[in-house]
Image (spheres, rainbow, N blue to C red):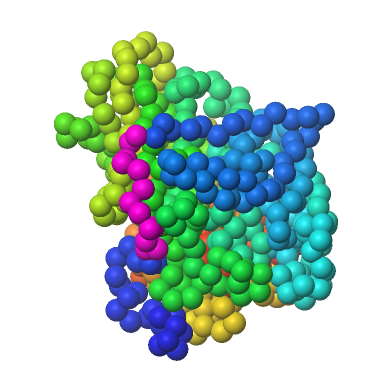
Amino acid sequence: LLSGGGLGLSGALAHRPAHTGGVLRSAGPGPEPYTVPLPVPPVLSPAAGRYEITQREASAEILPGTRTRLWTYNGTFPGPTIESRRGRTVRVVHRNELPVPTAVHLHGGRTPADSDGYPTDLNLPADWPREHHGAGHAMADPRAVTSRVTREYVFPNDQRATMLWYHDHRMDFTAPAIWRGLAGLHIVRDDVEDALDLPGGERELPLLLCDRSFDADGALRYPALDPALRDRPGVRGPYAAGVLGDVILVNGAPWPVHEADAARYRLRLLNGSNARHYDLEVVTDDGRRLDLVQVGSDQGLLAGPVTHTRLPIAPAERYDVVVDFGGLKPGTRVRLRNRLGSGRTREVLAFRIARQAKDASRIPRRLATDLPVWRRSQATAVREFAFRAGHMQHGRGWLIGGRAFDPGRTDVSTRLGAVEVWRFVADVHHPIHLHLVGFRVLSRGGGPPLPQDAGLKDTVSLRPGESAEIITRFDGYRGRYLFHCHNAEHEDMGMMANLEIT
Ligand code: C2O
Ligand code: CU
């Protein structure tokens, strides 16, 4: 792509369906799918009212018999899960023992700007020279704030119950940082959700899906992972459109299997991949298809359930679905599969029905009554943004409105409380994410939204050549926020812009 003088995706490639990037092959095939048990990330307990997370290198046995060096939150991948209550402030103290600066962003959080993990708002390691290039962008940004070693992030959690995730957001280096393990879940709960009898306890499973590639010794593969990491942002070659791995991990384990009751399960799905899209389906080994009954979206419960036979999920999107294993005989195997994959990347996760069981859960026909509704007539601005590849310069070839990210430039300025309609157009797949606010999808390609667009979203998946409109109200906090493509390689290569709320 680059030898052709830039990311010239305007031609045939733009119309290739599901184009997201290049598959980086592993040295070996990895384990036989559905032999490794499904892990569930540990839930973090606060100490003296604060959560403490140390960002450090650690190794884990991801592929059986090998060790993988990772960058972690508290030594595990995914990091520990934070469980919080709506309206109850959570304080998280991060300690940076990694060899690089970091910025922690709570994706989907209604977070004051100074705790939002702005990409130049860096927490430096103890020995990081301030003038080093890796923090140079922060230096070039007059509003950059830096801390050293420890940094407290404050999350008021004044928001609907949902599953958020936290991940690294350092300018130019988000993709390799997430790839190396800097991601974890944060679940917000509230009374609205508690009043419903959705499946809970062991029958509620957070599922972080992602893809990775490995060397024979278990090391992660990533184009230009190191040592170029310090001063050469961006990814070269066929992976400049996004890096795809060939090993599918769920909660950090390759193609795991979970022993399940013959009962309803609530699956809290997150696509934590850098660039891979999934189109999920649930099938039994004897060919029966089970519905994915969607009860929630990125930003919490829907007004009522939406039934899918397949569910596309783009990077950073979350779907809260109930799957009913009731009536399946013990011994039955059920697979969550990806229709967009090929060979082993079609496989994701299996459930082995272990026993009959009582099930007191249900899926109410009415779920949430607190979904915000905004009307076009309320909008005080309509804006349009083209998400397109452009000429590659200094590692930046993915553009919004023809421009690459510049922390020193305000791209959108709006007033606290303003309702706005934003229209996006895309050349290839771009999952578009706004910080701070949830939004409703108003239209796609001039027509109605898709069934999976229901509810309150914070990431909308634009398909190749597609346009979509969203509506939102910019409330909560003033300050500098972001919107960007959540294909993490696109993001690192410039597809990000500033949103200033005044
Ligand atoms: Cu999930 Cu700006 O990020
Ligand atoms: Cu993109």
Task: Kindly give the residue lying farthest to the bottom in the view shown.
Answer: 5
Quarter of the image where the C terminus is located: bottom right
**417 and 281: which one is in front?**
281
Magenta stretch contains residue 324: no
Residue at 52% from the left image edge and 78% from the top image edge: 397
Q: Position of residue 211 (x, y in %)?
A: 43, 52
Query: Quarter-wise, where is residue 349 in the image?
Result: top left
In this rendering, does residue 446 appear at all?
A: no
**273 and 319: which one is in front?**
273
In this rendering, does residue 402 appear at all?
A: yes
- Residue 265's place in the image compared with 282, above or below, is above
Residue at 29% from the left image edge and 65% from the top image edge: 17
Q: Position of residue 70 (x, y in %)?
A: 58, 50
Task: Kindly give the residue lying farthest to the top in the view shown.
Answer: 358
Quarter of the image where the N terminus is located: bottom left
Q: Position of residue 291 (x, y in %)?
A: 29, 34
Along the horizontal axis of the image, is 332 left or right of 134?
A: left
* Number of marks present in the image shown: 0
Q: Position of residue 216 (x, y in %)?
A: 42, 55
- Residue 469's place in the image compared with 38, above or below, is below
Along the horizontal axis of the image, is 71 left or right of 61?
A: right
Magenta stretch contains residue 29: yes
Residue at 51% from the left image edge and 32% from the top image edge: 40
**441 and 226: which one is in front?**
226
- Residue 254's place in the image compared with 458, above or below, is above
The span picked out in magenta is 23-35
**117 and 412: which one is in front?**
117
Query: Quarter-wise, where is residue 147 in the image?
Result: bottom right
- Secondary structure mostly seen in magenta is loop
Residue at 26% from the left image edge and 29% from the top image edge: 333
